[in-house]
């Protein structure tokens, strides 16, 4: 049975559930599917248990917005990010994502996978490590401005109880030992070339989604790790995969990659664990 689709349009307010089962408030700013292939969305420092807590709002407060992004639409489209209201868009056009690149046809803009945004929102509320990426400052680039970075964060290099400057994480929201162990994992990043210098064609994006599902199923069947999201922009798509052993993870997905024409001109990068990551140890495989 086909998945039921959720309609959405500019102004729609939606909820994104985080690991502690509260929900972050987001809003569709604009429908850029025709030109950029995705919606632009804002995320607000407002968390609720359910939609009833938003009753009576005439607009979402601008000063609570901490991020505006181009986001892949699948979690909106299938209702994982549930639309619960429609309100006027209060964020000024100048704060829409990459608005300064509109006249240039969005060249240089980035579209973030909805799965990556889920991880970003969890990190924003100290439910996972903020710096658990090859680039430890990756999530900083998703904020509207440096001033929007929370003072209370979890870092991979620091236990929650030891964080300075009042940034410790309470027991209620701290990661479990199992979650902290996952932060030491290896990774495989897959780089796929797209036609043009932006997001590729809708057909390419659909084919990459199908490839992602194949990779995810193979990784899960071998208990080799997880596929954690994607990012489109600059003429390429990146897929992010994590597991206890980068070599085993790549061996699991390699047969699928070698059979796909999508990987032509692309490459994968295997990165190894927390201890070697300090030396940026990595291996590139051209596909």
Image (cartoon, helix red, strand yellow):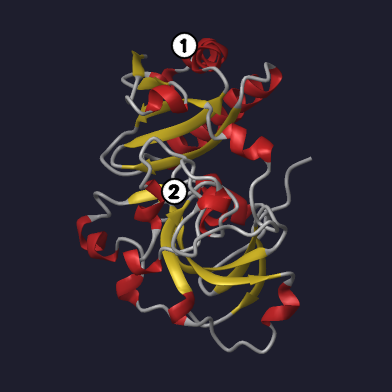
Looking at the image, which is closer to me, 252 or 179? 179
Q: Residue furthest left?
A: 104
Query: In terms of image quadrants, where is residue 63?
Result: bottom left
Looking at the image, which is closer to me, 222 or 9? 222
Disc 1 element: helix
Query: Vertical placement of 259 versus 7: above or below?
Result: above
Image quarter (top left, top right, bottom left or bottom right) of the C terminus: top left
Can residue 140 be seen by looking at this rendering?
A: yes
**Residue under the image location 39 percent in, 61 percent down:** 143
Disc 2 element: strand
**Residue under the image location 44 percent in, 63 percent down:** 165
Q: Position of residue 215 (x, y in %)?
A: 58, 24
Q: Position of residue 280 (x, y in %)?
A: 33, 26
Binning the other alpha carbons within 10 Å of mark 1 as few (below 14), some (14 to 19) or many (20 upward) gives: few
Q: Is residue 194 left or right of residue 225?
A: left
Q: Is residue 104 left or right of residue 193?
A: left
**Label 1 or label 2, whichever comes before in sequence order:** 2
In the picture of the structure, the residue carrying the numbered disc 1 is 258
Query: Vertical placement of 97 versus 84: above or below?
Result: above
- Which label sits in the foreground, 1 or 2? 2
In the picture of the structure, the residue carrying the numbered disc 2 is 112
**Residue under the image location 55 percent in, 30 percent down:** 212
Q: Position of residue 204 (x, y in %)?
A: 43, 34
């Amino acid at each position: 049975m086909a998945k039921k689709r959720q309609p959405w349009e500019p102004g729609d307010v939606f909820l994104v559930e985080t690991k502690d089962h509260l929900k972050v408030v987001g809003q569709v700013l604009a429908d850029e599917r025709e030109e950029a292939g995705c919606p632009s969305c804002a995320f607000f420092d407002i968390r609720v248990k359910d939609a009833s807590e938003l009753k009576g709002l005439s607009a979402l407060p601008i000063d609570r917005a901490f991020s505006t992004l181009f986001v892949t639409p699948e979690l909106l489209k299938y209702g994982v990010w549930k639309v619960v209201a429609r309100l006027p868009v209060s964020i000024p056009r100048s704060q829409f994502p990459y608005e300064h690149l509109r006249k240039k046809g969005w060249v240089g803009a980035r579209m973030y996978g909805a799965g990556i945004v889920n991880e970003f929102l969890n990190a924003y509320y100290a439910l996972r490590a903020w710096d658990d990426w090859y680039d430890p400052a990756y999530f900083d680039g998703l904020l509207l401005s440096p001033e929007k970075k929370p003072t209370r964060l979890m870092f991979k290099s620091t236990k929650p109880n030891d964080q300075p400057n009042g940034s410790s994480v309470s027991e209620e929201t701290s990661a479990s030992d199992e979650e902290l162990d996952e932060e030491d994992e290896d990774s495989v990043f897959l780089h796929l070339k797209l036609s043009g210098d932006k997001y590729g064609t809708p057909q390419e994006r659909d084919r990459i989604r199908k490839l992602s599902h194949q990779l995810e199923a193979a990784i899960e069947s071998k208990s080799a790790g997880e596929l954690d999201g994607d990012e489109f922009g600059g003429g390429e798509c990146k897929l992010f995969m994590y597991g206890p052993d980068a070599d085993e993870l790549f061996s699991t997905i390699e047969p699928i990659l070698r059979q796909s024409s999508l990987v032509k001109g692309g490459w994968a990068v295997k990165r190894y664990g927390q201890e070697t990551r300090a030396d940026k140890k990595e291996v590139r495989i051209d596909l």
